[in-house]
Image (tube, rainbow, N blue to C red):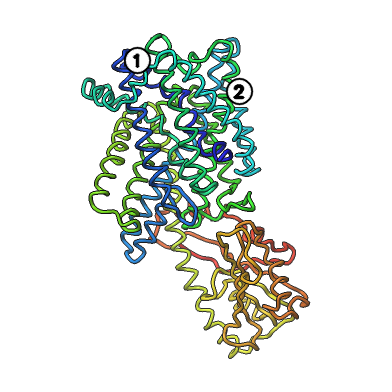
Amino acid sequence: MIAALGVVFGDIGTSPLYAMQTVFSIDHGAVRPTADDVYGVLSMMFWSATVVVSIKYVTVVMRASNDGEGGVMALAALAQRIYAHRGSRTAVLLLIGIVGVSLFYGDSVITPAISVLSAVEGLQVAAPSVSHLVVELAAVILALLFALQRFGTGRVGRLFGPIMLLWFAALAAAGLTEVVQHPGVLRGLSPTYAVSFVIAHPAISFIAMGAIVLVITGAEALYADMGHFGRPPIRRAWFAVVFPALYLNYLGQASLILHDPTAVANPFFLLVPDWARLPMVVLATAATVIASQAVISGAFSLSRQAMQLGLLPTLSVRHTSEHEGGQVYLPGINLLLFIGVLGVMLAFRSSQALATAYGVSVTGALLVDTILLLVVARILWHWRARQLVLAGLVFGGLEATFLAANLSKILSGGWVPLLIATSVLIVMSTWRKGRQLVLAKRRDTEGPLSDFVERVRTDQIPRVPGLAVFPHPTKDTTPLALRANVDHNHILHEHVLIVSVQTRKIPHVPLADAFSHDDLGYADDGIHHLTVRFGFADEPDIPRALEAACARKVLDPDLARIKPVSYFVSRGAITATHPGGLTGWRKQLFIALSHNAANPSARFGLPPQRTVTMGSDITI
């Protein structure tokens, strides 16, 4: 639970830094520091978090686990599985999932920038003499954060967890001090004040919704990070620590504004006594670094799920825990996020300016989750029609209002996360379509493996000494490198082994279950197929796996003594010549993405000096 505090709740846990201040600064003070407005805003904040975070995500959505994973791609995968027999519906659900994860990437770029900037800007209150260094200090802090990612989510969580516990304690203490002095502010928790505020000021309340959404940013990241820690620790941490601390602090800020309207300039830091402001800046900076961790680790989880669904090329993935399969580090995604975050921060240079860019992608992602949730609830959980209608109206209605209120921000900065989301959407849709074209071409070129085995037996192809190992995902088709070796070199090794690698969702696969051997119908032709199963914490090292298979006599032990052993990777060049399928620029994008996919040789631990890459060119 402590580790989950250090990773999952950083984003939503730092919203008191800027949420209340942003509400009272929109449209040059459209929301005024009067009792009706303050209580109305406080009530809207409280019930927005209760409905969206406490009820929707923590209580309902986190039940939707896709083999332990969470996030919009987990929902999309569950929905796809439900409609697997209906191609058109499956495609629509996948498209909705792609839109959702694209919007999440937009959020992943904005959140670290606005969070860290808002904390370091506390120097403008606590130490004005160094306030001109805010952007530079924030850039250094972010660079250190992204450098830490290589050590893994679990270790980062154990490092950050105690800090976040201290942060939430400080939030609660600062708010409680003010609430004890002015307990009347508790009236703002009543939903009647939100209703009265909307009725009395419909236009202003609608605009205010664009800022009030800041109190629930991080809800999607909370769900996306479920694979890192599981549901129970996240649920306990939210109800026992995070939710009470957050709303004690919001109550304190609201009370301060009621009794000192000038505090709207920075209610968070002005809530703190003079002597504690500089320490609070330091603690807030640490907390906002951790806030960034929530969306970064969420982006890692969603990226890996996108790869498994064929929406991104195979990137380098490092499992950073022996026990939790969801704890992963993707160096390529980490670098791209860092570049994006730094670029956005240097472009906007203040949290108030970034607030105008915030909200569009967040609310869009929330609404996508609701749509997919209703599909899963209808089929998988057997919800009745009235339950679906109620959930759609409450969750979807509130989130659609948030989205509509944030659409007004598009021209003043909201286009940034939308541009990021659109770019991700283009990349994912291009990779998926291009991959389908390549796989279809490869299947035609590879041909059935059974036909190839028969050809070897009838054509009397010359055999040369040694063992040839061909990594290949299936035993249904012939590896391109194997076919190319026969077609162009007119030879075949005396011993041919086709190896298919599978990764299971357990840390380690017992040796008794790690291998499956198939002689492909003939025990005397020297051509065999071996399936090797690895756990997520295992290194998929094919040479060592073959030694283990021989030692356990799954393969003929004599194979371990055969020299030389050569490894053949099937990889042909992809060229764009055929009309149709994809437009010209998208074909070039797909080719560029394929060039940056992880090298199979390195991924499977193949020795470079004994590995040959062969195959046929593929045109799309």
Residue 57 percent location from the top left of the image: 40, 42
Residue located farthest toward the left when viewing the structure as drawn: 199
Q: Which one is in front, 406 or 156?
A: 156
Residue 500: x percent and y percent?
59, 70
Q: Nearer the viewer, residue 76 or 617?
A: 76
Identify the element where label 1 is drawn.
Answer: helix
Q: Circle 2 is placed at which residue position?
A: 137
Q: Tell whether label 1 touches label 2 (CB within 8 Å).
A: no
Image coordinates for residue 384, horizontal then vertical, percent: 26, 54
In the rendered structure, the answer to whether residue 419 lies left or right of residue 468 reads left
| Quadrant of the rendering where the N terminus is positioned | top right
Does residue 552 appear in the picture of this structure? Answer: yes
Can you say whether 88 is above or below 298 in the image?
A: below
- Label for residue 28? 1
Quarter of image, res 552: bottom right
Q: Is residue 364 above or below residue 602?
A: above
x and y, in percent, of residue 143 in the image: 62, 32
- Kind of residue at disc 2: Leu
**Label 1 neighbour load within 10 Å: few <14, some 14-19, many 20+:** few
